[in-house]
Image (tube, rainbow, N blue to C red):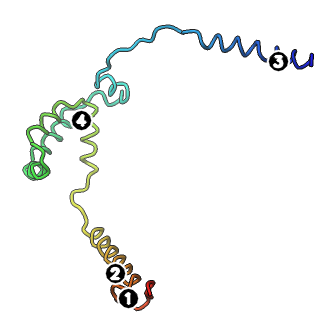
Amino acid sequence: MNAFRTYTRLIALPTAASMLLLSTPVGPAQAAMVSTEQVVQHAYPAESTVDASARDRVMNFLKRQDVQDQMRKLGVDPNEALARVSALSDAEIQKLAGRLDQMPAGGSAIGVIVGAAVFVFVVLLVTDLLCFTKVFPFTKCLIK
């Protein structure tokens, strides 16, 4: 019994001391408002300077008639979009201009056709299995 008390004192005293040290306040925290430009500068320090050609490319892209027609079709005011793009930071413009180069010029209809064919096949297969239709000879009716 005496050994147990000695052991618990050896454990309890350092544990209590460390808990006391950990619970003492360190000091007041300092907080301030941070602007978007400061965050972007900190996150992308190498992209802080952008040439005017990147900004011009993005603005010229948004001024194209087909782009403005698509924006109107989607319910976006083209003048509002131009105003918002002109308010972007240099790093954001650089990212946007880089993405313009990576975007494909047109989409492929093959994916849509294959997707539609797979969808029709699955629907017909399910209706065959539920005995609503008899399109495929390899299916057996699950409902009797």
Query: Label 3, label 2: how many angstroms apart (C-alpha)?
Result: 74 Å
Which residue appears at 28% of the width and 43% of the height? 98
Which disc number belongs to residue 136?
Answer: 1
Residue 80 at what x, y percent from top left?
A: 11, 37
Residue 108 at what x, y percent from top left?
A: 25, 65
Going from the N terminus, do you reach mark 3 or mark 2 first?
3
Disc 3 marks a residue whose amino acid type is: Thr
Marks 3 and 2 close (CB-CB < 8 Å):
no
Query: Label 1, label 3: how many angstroms apart (C-alpha)?
Result: 78 Å
Disc 1 marks a residue whose amino acid type is: Phe
Observer-side mark, 2 or 4, equals: 2
Secondary structure found at label 3: helix
Going from the N terminus, do you reach mark 4 or mark 1 first?
4
Which residue appears at 72% of the width and 16% of the height? 15
Which residue appears at 38% of the width and 78% of the height? 126
Which residue appears at 24% of the width and 29% of the height? 89
Pointer 3 residue: 8
Pointer 4 residue: 93
Going from the N terminus, do you reach mark 3 or mark 4 first?
3
